[in-house]
Image (cartoon, rainbow, N blue to C red):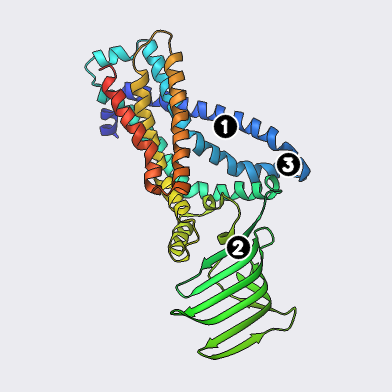
Amino acid sequence: MNIFNNRIKIIDWYIISKYLGTFLYTLTLFIVIIIIFDLSEKLDDFLSANLTFWQVLTLYYAGSIPFYVNMLSPLINFIAVIFFTAKMADQTEIVPILSGGVSFNRFLQPYFISAFIIFAFNLASNLYILPYTNRLKNSFENTYVKKNDPSSKNNIHMRLDENTFIYMDNFDNKTKIGSKFNLDKFKGDVLVKKLIAEQITYDSLKRKWTLRNYSTRYINGLKESLKSGAYGTTKDTVLDMRPDDFSAYDNIFENLSNKELADKIKKEKIRGTGVWNDLLFERYKRWLSPLSAFVLTLIGVALSSRKVRGGVGLPLGIGILLSFGYIVLGQFAKMFSLKGGISPLLSVLAPTIIFGLLGYYLLRKAPK
């Protein structure tokens, strides 16, 4: 503890407290404003579903508030750094620090300590909190807010393993029912089994699929045999697939835990359903997006540590513009990854790399 106190000076504690205090205050203010607008927008949906205040709070806002905190963290981080640093510069607090023999790199130390705290919180949130809170938020939205959106997926082709392929004409995510189900099993290039069912339903309690009006054809060279149940009969079977594999919602991957995401990536290598980039982007985003705390802190300090005429207004305006630019660039990178074939890893890192280079340039130009 004494070693820590010897390395962290009073001015360091002052900057850390200013940084984190401004960050938390601004973040809380933005979250309150967002909740007010969000509530006014979705109030009709809540009332039409006869939801109580407690249900809305525990089923929706318990999941959406962590989502908004994570989404706004880079923006608020940037604004907080620029605001209090520009204020320090305007009150001539930075000049005495640098004139007293403190190098600019040493001046950055408390900033990066604070950035590391935010980085660690965001990383822990991405890995261990958001997958579960997103499940609450997305489940609520899909049930009550997006209730009129299409919940079914059509013309589904999937490879379950090296020798098994399935096809469904349609699958409804709300009822967990698929129609015109086909399963083809091959041995090498030869079809050896073909199962057809008029309907397939997932039983979440048994974790099994129930086939209705089914028939199975076995093929052995020139010999074929057919087995079918009587009309209306059902049969339970275990298949390596889940209703989430056929989700029509675009927020399904946010709900997956790290283990579930890793398992789905392994299965996607075999299945080839076209969501490979989506899964990798989600994995890389969870691990790498918190790095924005360091990059935006560097840009914020370099941009606002010089005293300018007009006070904090100009640096704050430039900071808000750059922070929105960072978010927009991240969205463009995501679209290029999911739709344009760019590597998901490069797409996740692109905003951090580009703004990191900008931060390095501004650091070179910052007052020393």
For label 1, the residue is 31
Q: Compute the Cα span from label 3 to label 2.
A: 31 Å
For label 2, the residue is 155
Asked if the residue under mark 2 is in contact with the one under mark 1, i.e. CB atoms within 8 Å, the reply is: no
Mark 3 or mark 2: which is in front? 2
Mark 2 residue element: strand
Crowd band around label 2 with a 10 angstrom C-alpha radius: few (<14), some (14–19), many (20+): few
Residue 176 % position (x, y): 66, 63
In the displayed structure, does residue 352 sit left or right of residue 332? left
Residue 329 % position (x, y): 44, 35
Residue 236 seen in render: yes
Residue 142 % position (x, y): 65, 49
Q: Who comes first in sequence, dot 3 or dot 2?
A: 3
Residue at 51% x, 37% y: name it.
71
Q: Residue furthest top?
A: 309
325 vs 107, nearest the viewer: 325
Mark 1 or mark 2: which is in front? 2
Kind of residue at disc 1? Ile
Q: Is residue 192 above or below residue 344?
A: below
Mark 3 residue element: helix
Kind of residue at disc 3? Asp
Kind of residue at disc 2? Asn
Q: Which mark is residue 45?
A: 3
Residue 109 seen in render: no
Quadrant for the C terminus in the image: top left
Q: Who comes first in sequence, dot 1 or dot 2?
A: 1
